[in-house]
Amino acid sequence: SDMDSMSGMGGHAGHDMGAMALDAAALPEGAALRELPTLANEAGQPGLFKAKLTAAPATARFAADRDTPILAYNGTSPGPLIEAYEGDRVEITFANRIEGEQSTIHWHGMPVPADQDGNPMDPVAAGADRVYGFELPEGSAGSYWYHPHPHGKTAEQVYRGLAGAFVVKAKADPVPAAYGDTVLMFTDLRLAADGSMPDNTMNDLMNGRVGDHVLVNGQKNPRLTVAMGAKRRLRLYNATNARFLRLAFDGAAMTIIGTDGGLLGKPVAADEIMLSPAERVELVVAFDRAGTATLATLDYDRGWMGPGRPADAGLTLLTVDVSKTPGEAMPPLPERLRPIAPLGAPAVSRRLVFTETMAMNATGMEMGFLINGKAFDMERVDIVARAGETELWEIVNQADMDHPFHLHGTQFQVIERERGGKVAKPPYLAWKDTVNVARGETVRLLLRQERPGQRMYHCHILEHEQLGMMGILDVEA
Ligand code: C2O
Ligand code: CU
Ligand code: CU
């Protein structure tokens, strides 16, 4: 298993590959922001979205003068943007052309049947094809994404380039169309001097892989040009393996309008936002001052083991040029977006305790990333639940690092966070599928699974998921 293969590597713990890294200056910045290519709908009939996604080796040009071998969906990384509407049926043929590796496509955050959700229990062999089919229910509009989920290979296939955005649009959208609708997908990149992506080190396995560059839609610090007075709808995705993004706009005002599972009840003004790995947020950003506005990272200490904590403050992710001439007048954002009904009283409550274990033995360091004292086992069901029943889940982080908790198959509502004996209610109700649980913190959430079948829950630091911080929920009809 992965855990066994890590003993004997103790001498490498914390080893920094920095000396080998490609000079950051070799990565060009300031190109015009690339809109993600959209996946064409081949159905030719209303109510159906039909397309093909092929995962295969490809080449990218991150550095000006060096090619980087990557993995890509349909030749592009991030993968093509999928846009479909509530009420649509989706049929996507997946072709796995990754040599010698099984893969799957997981529809992160989407309410798809369990046997269509790309679980590690349902692998697609190298060279094989399969069709994923599901309906997008009414009310499911939101900012989802897709990525591989094969046993033991998820972290690597994702950092090598396999991830894409899946936006489900509402039939009646309260957000003015004049704001546009732009996906900003953040990924993380580390390049060796020859332009290749180095394998995960022991440090990466412990802390999660954090690279040297944060990219937006595959570009480093691209530029966006807007007219003064413009409002833009931006969907921000943290598609990194392990980087925590605490973000603020300098020179523009942010309003949060949605989270992982779609719009909030009403807009909320924000000075900064926090996106742990796999989280998304929908913003309306108002560019009311001529000049330059920048989206940059702030410092956030998520707990780091050993040396080499990356400097995560002050990275400019996006530069916006705001013209002196005002653009067309923008309609205001409505005061109410959509109703969010509280999930109500739970019939069942559960407690999930996240821990890390580190032990030196004769052959090296042994690490465990555990939930309720256990590492993931594909053959074991950890929790049995009933479809349609509301549950209270208490996620307790007793570890030294933050762990972003994610559950497949549904969206949940965070109702409480507790730390050092202090209990806080979230400032607003929201639909989420991933929530950061800081070290020493307990997060309480309500959830309801509507469909039967097996669902994964795990830490979305993908290296931790791979090393065992994952379980199986079996939902009975
Ligand atoms: Cu995006 Cu099981 O995860
Ligand atoms: Cu998921
Ligand atoms: Cu974790």
Image (spheres, rainbow, N blue to C red):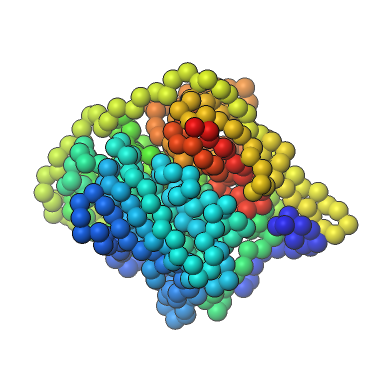
Q: Is residue 302 above or below residue 204?
A: above
Residue 26 location (% of width, % of height): 46, 74
Quadrant assignment, res 220: bottom left
- Give the farthest residue toward the top: 345
Q: Residue at the spot x=69%, y=45% of the render? A: 375
Q: Total marks drawn?
A: 0
Q: Is residue 345 above or below residue 310?
A: above
- Give the farthest residue toward the left: 328
Q: Residue 151 vs residue 6: left or right?
A: left
Camera sees residue 317: no
Residue 258 location (% of width, % of height): 34, 38
Q: Camera-side residue: 222 or 134?
A: 134
Q: Camera-side residue: 443 or 150?
A: 150
Q: Residue at the spot x=72%, y=48% of the render? A: 368
Which quadrant does the N terminus fall into?
bottom right
Residue 3 location (% of width, % of height): 73, 55
Q: Residue 352 vs residue 299: left or right?
A: right
- Give the farthest residue toward the right: 362
Q: Residue at the spot x=88%, y=57% of the render? A: 362
Camera sees residue 81: yes
Q: Residue at the spot x=26%, y=32% of the render? A: 337
- Give the farthest residue toward the bottom: 65
Quadrant assignment, res 438: top right
Q: Residue 25 vs residue 396: left or right?
A: left
Residue 64 location (% of width, % of height): 42, 78
Q: Camera-side residue: 454 or 244?
A: 454
